[in-house]
Image: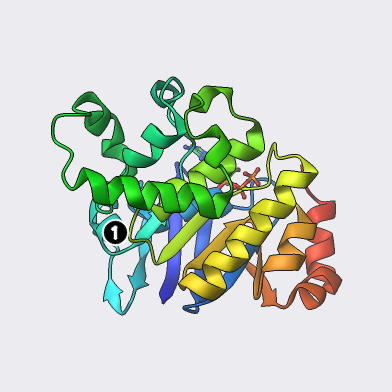
Amino acid sequence: MLEVDQLVMSYGGFRAVDNCSLSVTEGSITGLIGPNGAGKTTLFNLVAGAFPPSSGRIRYLGEDITGLSTDRRFHLGLVRTFQIPHEFHRLTVMENLMMVPPHQAGETLLANWLTFGKVRRNEEEVRQRAEETLAFLELEHVAEERAGNLSGGQKKLLELGRTMMTDARLVLLDEPAAGVNRTLLRKLEEKIAILNKERGYTFILIEHDMEMIEKLCHPVICMAEGRVLIEGDFATVRADERVLEAYLGET
Ligand code: ATP
């Protein structure tokens, strides 16, 4: 589904991503781990199209998308979850979901908010989808709550919900477990697993929470110093000496 070929991202002379090659199979939940500064987030930014690579190619669904904008990638179903923008904190959970029509990219959400109530099309259809999303995520009880008042875990569920309002096929999740309490963490894991198994979403998940990686991800890719160190099942990757060394050398 996704092929990253010899990708390089240089900042001055420093290579945050250094000849990185990997591929992601449709239907998988691929875990991306590695010590701080390994280049995981930079790789996500390159795949999502936040900025172009210094060199290398990215292919998605058989098409070279290296030169495509974030918006074009979004239209192809390649979606990166974003934190709820600050401006959206005073909107309700329901409104936050309804802000995201299927073909609306994250970056243009603010513009959409500014015209909220004027240009929405198929409002009933969008509302129905939002209600289904709320029910799936078990967030109905906070539907009219302001997003800014949600707990860390509820915000992560809402971020996932906003992805569900799009026609996503490949979802990039950056540290979904960060700031989430144990109870909601289990719920988040359960929802990601269901979205993968029953609704066909493919995920790439950057995560430092190894319990979540172990439960959800196959395969697991470990990056260090901008490139792939090893790929395999969780147990194999965890037991690999190079992985241990990379984490021990973490600054
Ligand atoms: P973490 O797990 O801590 O989030 P990471 O694996 O996601 O780390 P990145 O955030 O991709 O790592 O950073 C990789 C390296 O690139 C780091 O050394 C970082 O300091 C550097 N880096 C990232 N963005 C920039 C930038 N805009 N300018 C200069 N260096 C950068």
Q: What amino acid type is highlighted by mark number 1?
A: Arg
Point 37% across, 61% down: residue? 168
Q: Is residue 66 above or below residue 207?
A: below
Q: Residue 159: x, y in percent?
A: 49, 43
- Of residue 49 and residue 202, the one placed in the foreground of this image is 202
Q: Residue 5: x, y in percent?
A: 43, 72
Q: Residue 228: x, y in percent?
A: 61, 68
- Of residue 246 and residue 178, the one placed in the foreground of this image is 178
Point 32% across, 45% down: residue? 127
> In what quadrant of the picture does the C terminus appear?
top right
- Of residue 48 and residue 215, the one placed in the foreground of this image is 215
Q: Is residue 168 visible?
A: yes
Question: In the visual, does 237 lie left or right of 134?
Answer: right
Instruction: Label 1, secondary structure: give it.
Output: helix
Question: In the visual, does 59 lie left or right of 19?
Answer: left
> In what quadrant of the picture does the N terminus appear?
bottom left
